[in-house]
């Protein structure tokens, strides 16, 4: 499909504004990141939540817009952008073949090489709201829908709460069917591409709490043969259910649990594991609000905690930073979505960490042009750009569609 250069609303930032943004964002003398633009789509509607989800790989960027009303109320959409001559240019807009009311297409997005997966957690299957994942592959210069993934089990609801792509696999989170106690403990369904996309495995929590939904599948991430997700369990030596992050590895015996990670002092209301990320032999686990210890815990694949990352401007008040609500990594750079506890009004932030001599060091704090609590709802990073979603921010024409900020690395 030919790029439609007129369909993207974008604000290019002059050197004075870019310099101002770096002054706000630089930490410890690092001023190598500059704000170059913020953009939306001219087709995004009021309340579209443009930027609710982001995923980038190389020159490609996918932006979820689950609240988009253009086709039907909250039917949702997703936009494909490509990096062309230093700018993010809108290439295509994806949606259900027959958009349905409330499907929220674009709630989660993932791109890896020539594959895009987009969740629609309220899509209808045979007339029933169950959820689906739509898979696109690049054919020449176009992105073509090749599969619609649905839950392989009956009586599954809320399929496609989260989605991840790596190589020839797609992992999809679901609330799962009810167990004997009529509790939905969640499941992760793994699909593999052979001649076509087929269901390969189903992963579940093997020690769920008898009466509390385990939420298995929250904080889903996938990289090569490794998969990480969170669940709520009551361990043998604990009195209350706790959030536990599990790492799985695929091998000759299929998917095998490699390790479990938890923070024993946190109780069940904490958001430990609400976000996870795999990369560079490490597992990153967001804690986030309402925790009294906003941080990102870093583990090795064997489940040993090797570091804890906190923002330099961390507030003493619990839950204020919401640090770790979004995670993205590229090479030796880690981006963490959070909140600025000292801004006038409520404003989100994105923190940049760099791997230096084996340690993760905060090198920059990125902020929106004006106070905006949604800045940092989603993040992505490429070799040249850091991208931050602000899902309720207004475009230049005053329509609150949501926008994406692009920072030049």
Image (cartoon, rainbow, N blue to C red):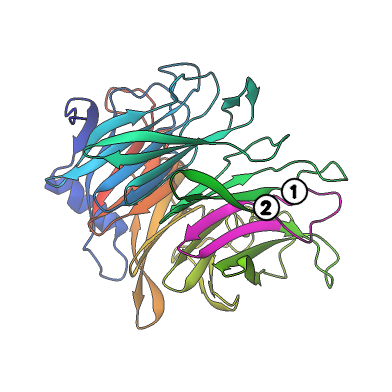
Looking at the image, residue 191 sits to the left or right of residue 71; the answer is right
Instruction: Report crowding for label 1: few under 14, some 14 to 19, many 20 or more residues within 10 A (C-alpha).
Output: many
Above or below, comparing residue 348 to residue 306 in the picture: above
Badge count:
2
Question: Label 2: which residue?
Answer: 216
Image position, residue 314 (x, y; %): 50, 63
Residue extending farthest front? 195
Question: Quadrant of the image for the N terminus?
Answer: top left
Image: magenta residue range: 204-231
Image position, residue 27 (x, y; %): 32, 66
Looking at the image, residue 7 sits to the left or right of residue 332; the answer is left
Residue at the spot 41% in from the left edge and 27% down from the top edge = 95
Residue extending farthest bottom? 357
Depth check: give the residue in front, 378 or 93. 93
Above or below, comparing residue 366 to residue 256 in the picture: above
Looking at the image, residue 384 sits to the left or right of residue 194; the answer is left
Above or below, comparing residue 290 to residue 197 in the picture: below
* Label 1 or label 2, whichever comes before in sequence order: 1
Image position, residue 104 (x, y; %): 51, 29
Question: Label 1: which residue?
Answer: 185
Say if mark 1 contacts mark 2, CB within 8 Å. Answer: yes
Question: Quadrant of the image for the C terminus?
Answer: bottom left
Above or below, comparing residue 33 to residue 332 in the picture: above
Mark 1 and mark 2: Cα distance apart in space: 6 Å
Image position, residue 223 (x, y; %): 46, 61
């Amino acid at each position: 499909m030919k790029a439609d250069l007129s369909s993207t609303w974008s604000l290019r930032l002059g050197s004075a504004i870019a310099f101002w943004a770096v002054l706000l964002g630089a930490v410890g003398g690092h001023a190598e990141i500059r704000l170059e633009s913020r953009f939306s789509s001219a087709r995004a509607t009021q309340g579209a939540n443009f930027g609710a989800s982001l995923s980038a790989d190389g020159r490609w960027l996918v932006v979820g817009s689950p609240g988009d009303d253009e086709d039907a109320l909250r039917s949702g959409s997703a936009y494909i952008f490509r990096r062309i001559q230093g700018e993010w240019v809108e290439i295509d807009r994806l949606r259900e073949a027959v958009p349905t009311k409330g499907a929220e297409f674009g709630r989660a997005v993932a791109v890896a090489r020539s594959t895009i997966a987009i969740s629609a957690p309220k899509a209808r299957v045979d007339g029933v709201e169950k959820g689906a994942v739509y898979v696109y592959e690049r054919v020449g210069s176009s992105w073509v829908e090749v599969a619609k993934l649905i839950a392989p089990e009956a009586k599954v609801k809320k399929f496609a709460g989260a989605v991840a792509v790596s190589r020839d696999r797609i992992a999809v989170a679901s609330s799962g069917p009810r167990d004997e106690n009529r509790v939905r403990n969640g499941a992760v369904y793994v699909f593999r591409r052979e001649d076509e996309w087929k269901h390969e495995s189903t992963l579940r929590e093997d020690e769920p709490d008898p009466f509390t939904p385990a939420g298995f599948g929250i904080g889903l991430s996938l990289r090569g043969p490794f998969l990480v997700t969170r669940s709520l369990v009551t361990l043998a030596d604990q009195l209350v259910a706790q959030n536990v992050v599990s790492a799985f590895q695929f091998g000759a015996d299929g998917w095998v649990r490699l390790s479990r990670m938890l923070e024993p002092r946190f109780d069940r209301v904490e958001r430990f594991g609400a976000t996870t990320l795999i990369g560079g032999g490490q597992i990153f686990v967001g804690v986030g609000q309402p925790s009294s210890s906003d941080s990102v815990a870093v583990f090795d694949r064997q489940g040993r905690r090797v570091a804890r990352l906190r923002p330099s401007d961390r507030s003493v008040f619990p839950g204020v930073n919401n640090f770790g609500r979004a995670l993205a990594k590229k090479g030796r750079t880690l981006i963490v979505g959070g909140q600025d506890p000292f801004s006038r009004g409520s404003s989100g932030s994105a923190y940049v960490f760099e791997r230096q001599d084996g340690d993760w060091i905060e090198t920059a704090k990125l902020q929106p042009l004006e106070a905006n609590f949604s800045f940092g709802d989603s993040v992505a990073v490429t070799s040249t750009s850091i991208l931050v979603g602000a899902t309720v921010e207004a475009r230049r024409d005053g329509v609150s569609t949501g926008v994406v900020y692009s920072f030049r690395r």
